[in-house]
Image (tube, rainbow, N blue to C red):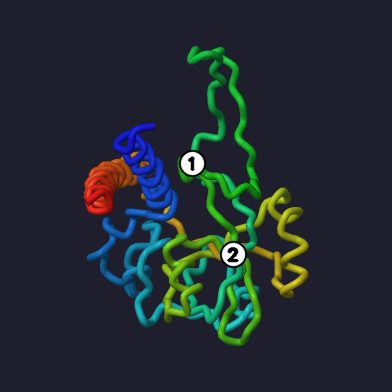
Amino acid sequence: MKKTNMIATVSVLIALIGAALLFFNWNPEALFKLNEPMVSMSDIEQNITTDFTGSPAGPDIPRLTGAEDFSEIIYLADYVTAEPVGIVQTGISSLSPWEDHYYTQRVKGRATGRQIRLPEITSSGWDFPGSYQPYYLLELPDHTYIVAQIPQETAKAIEKGKSVTLPIGQKVSMTSAARNELSSICAEYGADMDGVFYAFNDKWQEEHQFILLLLRFGAAALLWFVLVAGLIWAGCKLFKIEEA
């Protein structure tokens, strides 16, 4: 194989890896919420029909200090937040409520008309379109744990030891399928399975899911192009230097 062909092939492969890492690890959602104002209890009381789940929490939003606090709040009624001191990945994810639970089977590119239901729960790390929401165990200030579904960028910040105030969340029920998958790790950490701290605004997510996917694709494609061009240029320069 000629050196130029070898350089091009290696460059394309390295660029593909870089682009894939960006696509699977970058969530552009934060770009839409850079200037989103904090929500106070007054805002909630004056707009009782508005769903504030997922909004930035103001200083007067009740903070969960332990699992006992969480056990006392009312399902889908009380708005709360928390400032976790740790987080545990469970490896279990549930299908997002705003996602289509069925897809049409295709054979050789043609639709068969058969509708196949996506699994409600998965333990696979492969989530190409970002259709699943991971479950986490949040360690609260008193070092007790609760089950939560929060934005992955927020989870990463907690993992890095950053001080984080969670988006406003509510207590939602846990499905029997999720309960079965999470029972072992919840028992290990003593996490109560009576409810999940949920911090996503389903309506906002449904309205923006397509543009978020396009942005991820676009950014990954741009990175791939830049890396290929840069690596080929660098490779050619390097070989010229060595041959000299």
Whether 201 is drawn above or below 71: the answer is above
State which quadrant residue 146 falls in: bottom right
The residue under the point 60% across, 79% down is 69
Front-lying residue, 45 or 103? 103
In the picture of the structure, the residue carrying the numbered disc 2 is 136
Q: In the visual, does 113 lie left or right of 219?
A: right
The amino acid type of the residue labelled 2 equals Tyr
Q: Badge 2 local density, few (<14 within 10 Å), some, or many (20+)?
A: many
Q: Are marks 2 and 1 in contact (CB under 8 Å)?
A: no
Whether 163 is drawn above or below 8: the answer is below
In the picture of the structure, the residue carrying the numbered disc 1 is 128
Residue 115 in picture, x, y percent from top left? 59, 22
The amino acid type of the residue labelled 1 equals Phe
Residue 236 in picture, x, y percent from top left? 24, 45
Residue 202 seen in this snapshot: no
Whether 132 is drawn above or below 195: the answer is above
